[in-house]
Image (spheres, rainbow, N blue to C red):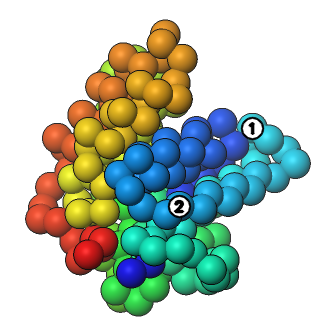
Amino acid sequence: MEKSILISGTGGQGIVAAGEFLSEALFTAGYEVINIRSYGSEARGGSCRSEVLVSDSEIYDLSLGEVDILIVLSVPAFRRYQDRAKAGGFVLVDSEVIEKYDGEIREDIELVQVRAGEIALGLGNSIVANMVLLGALAKRSALIKLDNLKDAVRTRMRPSMQEINLRALDAGYARVRGAQTRVEMP
């Protein structure tokens, strides 16, 4: 089985880092993983995405069309990537994005909102909203375990930033509601 994940937002929101931590966590959990990232030449403030392909066997096809999971941290990213989610796909989004979005929201997706930015500010640093959403992903999908994400933070992040990122993962995991989605590996 193969799954595709698109993490999107604006440069400076930790989109690339979120993709790297998720990829590391999936790899150490025993999956084959490919991570592709893209960001505009504007860097901070420009469009940014990280795409993760994960499989329980070797990955031969690198086509990144529709995605099983879409994670969104900004209104421009939601506007741009909402249509990349497969029908019936799982879309995890910062609640503030939906509050500010003035367009149509697809009815054929499972939209899960988490107050990621607000939670991150409460923890003391808005930059960890990305990790709040990764924690929520661990709770709502059987794709990755929270402990795998925490191990990735401990392995890949400088020690001075580990504590707040671990707390952000826990906060996202604790705050998301509902049962696990269909997005799981066999």
From the viewer's perspective, is residue 88 above or below residue 81? below
Q: How far separated are the C-alphas under marks 1 and 2? A: 27 Å
Q: Position of residue 148 (x, y in %)?
A: 32, 42
Structural crowding at the residue carrying mark 1, measured as other residues with C-alpha within 10 Å and reported as few (<14), some (14–19) or many (≥20): few
Q: Amino acid at mark 1?
A: Arg
The quarter in which the N terminus is drawn is bottom left
- Which structural element holds mark 1? loop
From the viewer's perspective, is residue 69 above or below residue 173? below
- Residue at the top extreme, as displayed: 160
The residue lying toward the viewer, choosing from 85 and 157, is 157
Side of 146 where 104 appears, left or right? right
From the viewer's perspective, is residue 140 above or below residue 80? above
Q: Amino acid at mark 2?
A: Val
User: Residue 104 shows which numbered tag?
Assistant: none
Q: Position of residue 36 (x, y in %)?
A: 67, 59
Q: Position of residue 141 (x, y in %)?
A: 25, 63
Side of 110 where 45 appears, left or right? right
Q: Which residue is mark 1?
A: 44
